[in-house]
Image (cartoon, rainbow, N blue to C red):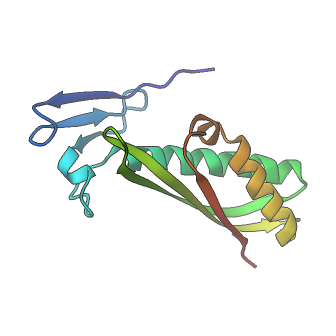
Amino acid sequence: MPTRTARTAWNGTLQEGGGQVELTSSGVGTFEVSFPKRAADSAGGTTSPEELIAAAHSSCYAMQLSAIIGEAGGTPQSLEVTADVSLGSDTVGFKLTGIKLTVRGEVEGLDAEGFAKAAQAAKETCPVSKALTGVEITLDASLEQ
């Protein structure tokens, strides 16, 4: 299996410095990072580790859910997945305080109970969920008609 790479170049102090994170493997972009904007309510045009984790988690979860729906005999027509990753204080520094996965799906061949079961299984077996076992992950899943 492949290895993917991202690279960050940082200059300066935590409060006054800043950096750029580069999605090296895909080459799709380089994005600004800043601690003051990371800790602020508004991102102000920068990304953060939490947003990057949210992107990784929502995309991984969508792929895993699609696979599990197929294994259960359903056909996903569309899956809309949002991951909200929260940052909070820790005894030393900061920590991720929770992740909320929200999924809305249009699926042929599964009822609401089957979809809920597939959604829960995807939450438990998605590789990113497995990597983030130290963080509480909640799930809000519903089948749209």
* Quarter of the N terminus within the rendering: top right
* Quarter of the C terminus within the rendering: bottom right
Image check: 12 left or right of 31? left
The residue shown at (22%, 36%) is 20
Does 32 appear above or below 7?
A: below
Instruction: Give residue 53's position: percent from left, percent from top.
Output: 46, 44
Question: Count of labels shown?
Answer: 0
Residue 42 visible at all:
yes
Does 99 appear above or below 130?
A: below
Does 57 appear above or below 5?
A: below
The residue shown at (71%, 71%) is 142
The residue shown at (37%, 38%) is 28
Image check: 55 left or right of 34? right
Q: Of residues 32 and 91, which is closer to you in this image?
A: 91
Image check: 56 left or right of 103? left
The residue shown at (56%, 40%) is 134
Does 49 appear above or below 40?
A: above
Q: Of residues 99 and 23, which is closer to you in this image?
A: 99
Image check: 15 left or right of 81? left
